[in-house]
Amino acid sequence: MSLIFKIFTLNCWGIPIPLICKDRQDRINAIGDALASNSYDVVCLQEVWSDRDYFLIKEKVSGVLPYSHYFHSGVTGSGICIFSKYQIKETFFHQWPLNGYIHKIHHADWFGGKGVGLCKLSVDRYTVHVYSAHLHAEYDRNFDEYEAHRILQAYDTAQFISLTSEGADLVILAGDLNTEPGDLAYRALLNVAGLVDSFLVAERMLNSDKHATCESWCNSYTPSNLAKKKNLGKRIDYIMYHPGSKLKVVLQDYRLPLPDRVQGKDFSYSDHEAVEATIALSEKKVETTEIDIVERQYIFKDCLVILNNALDRLKTHKTIYLLFAVVLMALLIMSLVFETPYGYIVLFNIVRAIVSILIFICLLMALIWNSIERNAILAGKLAIEVNMMKYSES
């Protein structure tokens, strides 16, 4: 007899700043109502940045999803929360060592202390590990300054899943992974953690022009220049799974469950689309899938190329920051040595204060932040090299 298990994931776009995040309160209410009127077994939400929004959703869904957990992290909270029909036995949050840059305030990924959250569920007689993650955003695909960060986050997540899922009957990863199919981060997640992308299994079930989860022409928050072109958008939100040795998993349904607009409104639920997958679990011994060692080696080699390039860039960045600091120090000393023109004392003091702050920032980035990023990249690089050696010897 099969057990049906239904999963939902959505990036809620819940930044509590009205000028940046439109219609947030109405959308959060609508998301809570939509979840409360359905029969999901587990719900993974991202970008729930406000405690008030989390508790609002929690209250709305308490009748159908009585168990929940919010993963607190960073300055603003991770934004990740999980709601469950089944009791949550254990939780754990693993924060990634690389999360973007503190001085990129307009990107703000660093302030969320991003990582991967784990909830262990007891589902009838099965142990189900539900992981939810929100990888660093890709702000410019042509010049992606965060590529190394996202690849390390993906590899770190895959390793975390592999090392914590022993004894699990079912593993699920759901969330906004900010990587498109075929990207190196996507391939690392699937291959290293042995996951299955539910979309690929269910591709025949879908309307081919409506599978994107971000920047789809159907979404009210997609930029008008893309919407007018009927832009298909990109698929960066996923539900992935991997059965343990006891179970056979059959995907029964995959869909984007929410309508294009909130009922009675002219806006969508979020700037992302929700994803829903329904799987059937049955107790049947299945053969263990062989790991594609050749593919894994290719993935590792590609990762190392990008990480080595990132290390080289760090050396350049350190030199540039130190050079800027030296130049600014020279200007500051000159302003102190030479007599300040009468009537401009206040202005010169303000300029000196600004220059002093800039010197501090340059030294901070060159001597401290550069070392933090370098060590994080080296740690990931060494972990990948250990894995490469393991498979080359087998």
Image: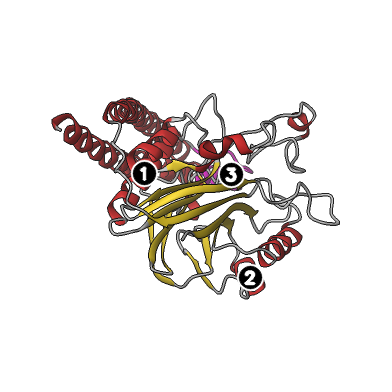
User: Which circle's residue, 2 or 3, is located before the other in the chain?
Assistant: 2
Q: Residue at x 63, y 46 (%)?
A: 255
Circle 1 Cα neighbour tier, 10 Å, few/some/many (<14 / 14–19 / ≥20) = some
- Percent position (x, y) of residue 136? 49, 43
Residue 61 is tagged as 2
**Residue 198 highlighted magenta (yes or no):** no
Principal secondary structure, stretch drawn in magenta: helix
Q: CA distance from mark 1 to mark 2?
A: 42 Å
Helix, strand or loop for disc 1: helix
Image: 30 above or below 190: below
Q: Which residue is mark 3?
A: 106
Say whether residue 210 is left or right of residue 75: right
Relative height, residue 300 to residue 53 (above, below): above
Q: Is residue 342 magenta?
A: yes
Occupied quadrant, residue 151: top left
In the rendered structure, are the residues bearing label 3 and label 1 in contact, judged by CB atoms less than 8 Å apart?
no
In the picture, residue 188 is in which quadrant? Answer: top left
Q: Amino acid at mark 3?
A: His
Chain part drawn in magenta = 339-354
The disc label shown at residue 369, or none: 1
Mark toward the start of the polypeptide (1 vs 2): 2
